[in-house]
Image (tube, rainbow, N blue to C red):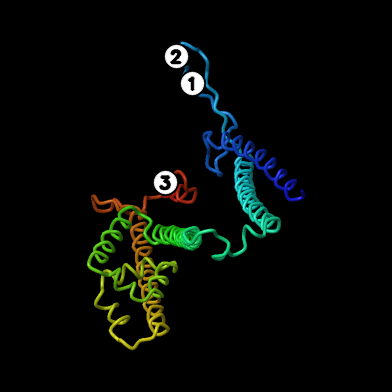
Amino acid sequence: MALEEEDKNVVESTGATESQEHAAETVGTKESVAPDEAAPTEVRNDDVSKGAGITEVKKVPTELERAQYSFHKQFAKQNRKHAEELAEMRKLVASLQDQIKNPDKYRPKYRDDFNTADEYIDYRSEQKFNKLMEEQRAKMEQEAKQKSEYDAMTNYYRERAQKHINTLYPTDEAKSHYKEVVDKAFNDGLGELLDRDENVSNYLMRRPYGPAILMAIAEEPETYLSRLYDDPYMSTGERLDELKDIEREVINKLEQAKKQAELATQQQTAVSTEPPKVIGKPGINAPAKRNLWDDEDALNKFLDSRR
């Protein structure tokens, strides 16, 4: 009875949270704004509906409403998961109770329990079939779980690698060049070579400078791949140490290129801000003569010379 009451409470709470989630989704489907933008809670659309003469008003969710929507959505998801687990537990408990009430139904049966040999053979065949199907179902569930976990991990590291690419190659031109070089290298077999040691591929995928290392290997495969794979007796640890050395070299090159670019920008800025020199007649750039009327001493000397 306690289990049934708990199940009832979970179902009721699930229904409530589903209503909350539906309401939250209604809010979430409205027009959203960036967090750093100070947007009003209501936006009026000046386009008047045909024949209606009514101005449409769209509500923009606030930061609090978006946070509430996310919370209710996650809460409803966890509640449904708990309800499903509870339903499976109830099935198990019901099966165990039935085994207690009807032990003969679940005990192993033998030839003497059947009237004919054919009935016994059918029973054994059904038992083997059910066991095989149960093993197959468990295997499929395990494979589905492993695939789901692998896909989640792959998507996580793919998004993480894309962030590193965006950081290292911020412009569209740089991204396009990176993609062109790396794609060509992978088409030539670079991917299969790197996958020979999964520690190398994982290192490149996880490190912030992984895309830059991959770019360097793709541009100069003979230089870097020979350091990683020419020695057939190189251990995984030694290969990772060599990969770290390559990473340091790549970082140094990137820093030098960045400094050179900054220096060139500074020089260009200095040239553009230097005042232009006036070119013309001789003496045009000479300092202007002092005005006699502005200099009292010079004026007195001039008057004295005239007396």
- Residue located 35% across and 55% down the image: 274
> Is residue 31 depicted above or below 121 in this figure?
above
Circle 3 residue: 291
Q: Are marks 1 and 3 in contact (CB under 8 Å)?
A: no
Identify the residue at the far top of this view. 51
- Residue located 29% across and 77% down the image: 225
* Alpha carbon separation for disc pair 1 and 3: 67 Å
Percent position (x, y) of residue 247? 39, 75
From the viewer's perspective, tell me whether residue 163 is left or right of residue 73.
left
* Amino acid type assigned to the residue bearing label 1 in the image: Asp
* Amino acid type assigned to the residue bearing label 3 in the image: Asn
Quadrant hosting residue 199: bottom left
From the viewer's perspective, tell me whether residue 255 is left or right of residue 103.
left
Percent position (x, y) of residue 271? 33, 57
* Alpha carbon separation for disc pair 1 and 2: 12 Å
Q: State the SS at label 2.
A: loop
- Residue located 30% across and 59% down the image: 179
Label located before the other in sequence (2 or 3): 2
Taking depth in this image into account, of 213 and 24 the one nearest to the observer is 24
Circle 2 residue: 50
* Amino acid type assigned to the residue bearing label 2 in the image: Lys
Q: State the SS at label 3.
A: loop
Circle 3 crowding by C-alpha within 10 Å: few under 14, some 14–19, many from 20: few
Q: State the SS at label 1.
A: strand
Taking depth in this image into account, of 293 and 1 the one nearest to the observer is 1
Identify the residue at the far bottom of this view. 233
